[in-house]
Amino acid sequence: MQLPLTILSALSVFLLYDGATASPTAIDKDNTMQSRQSTRTLGFIGCSMAENVAQGYVAVGGQRLWGPYGTGGMVVQSWTNNNSNSWRLFDQHAARYGKPNAVWVQVCIFSQQGVTYDEVKRLISNAREHASPGADIYITGQPVYEGGNTCFLADSSGQELTESLAKRAAEDPELNVKYAGQFVLKRGEVSDGCHANTAGQQSLGRQALAYWG
C-alpha cells in the first residue's frame, strides 16, 4: 500500500527536522571537548610544592595551567625515567586536555636524594617528549619563604640548590628553557614548614596567574 503524498511529505519534513536537531548535539559535544582540550595548555611536573601552586591557580580562576593531578612526593628522581609511573600519570592527564604546548618543570627534591644538573637536563628532555612538538619549557626551583625559613624535607640548602640549577638550565642555550622566577610564601602562608596552607596556595596561584595568565 502506498502512503498518501501528504503523509510522505510530512514524514520527510520530520526526518529532516530530526536530523537537524541531532547534528548540533553531536557538534556541541565536539566543541565542548575541543574547548576543554584547548583551555588547559600548560602542563607541569614536580612534587607537592607544584601541586600547591596548581591548587591555588585553579582556586583563583586561572585557566591555562593544569589543575592538581596527584604529584605529591614526586621529586626529581620520579621524573628522570621517561617511562615512570609519574610520566604515565602525566600522560593520563594530557589525554584529558590534549598534549600541552608548554610545560612547567619544578625542580623539587628530598634531602636524601638531592639533585644533579644532569638529572635536571633529563627532566627537560623528558618533558619535551611528553608535550606537543615545539612546546615551551619553563623551569623553577622550589618555593622560597619570607623570613629565611627553609623546608625540612629539602634540607637547609635545598631551596638554594634547586633555584641555582633552574637558573643554570635557563642560561644554557642548548636547553632552550625559560626561568619563571621564584614562587614566594609569606609568613602565615605555610602549614607545616614546607607546604602552603589555603592562603598560601592562593598566594602561589596568584603569582602563577600573574606570570602565565
Image (cartoon, rainbow, N blue to C red):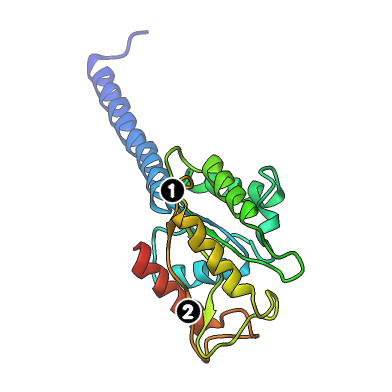
- At label 2, the amino acid type is Val
Which residue is drawn at the image coordinates 61% and 56% (left, top)?
A: 117
Q: Which element carries disc 2, helix, strand or loop?
A: strand
As drawn, which residue projects farthest toward the right? 112
Quadrant containing the C terminus in the rendered view: bottom left
Residue position for label 1: 173
Query: Relative to 22, does residue 184 appear above or below in the rendering?
Result: below
**Mark 1 and mark 2: span between their CA atoms?**
27 Å
User: Position of 11 compared to 122: left or right?
Assistant: left
Q: Which residue is mark 2?
A: 184
Residue extending farthest to the top is 1
Q: Is residue 141 visible?
A: no
Q: Residue at x 53, y 78 (%)?
A: 144
Instruction: Count residues near mark 1 (Cα–Cα under 10 Å), then give few for <14, some for 14-19, many for 20+.
Output: few
From this viewpoint, is residue 45 visible?
yes
Q: Which is nearer the N-term, disc 1 or disc 2?
A: 1
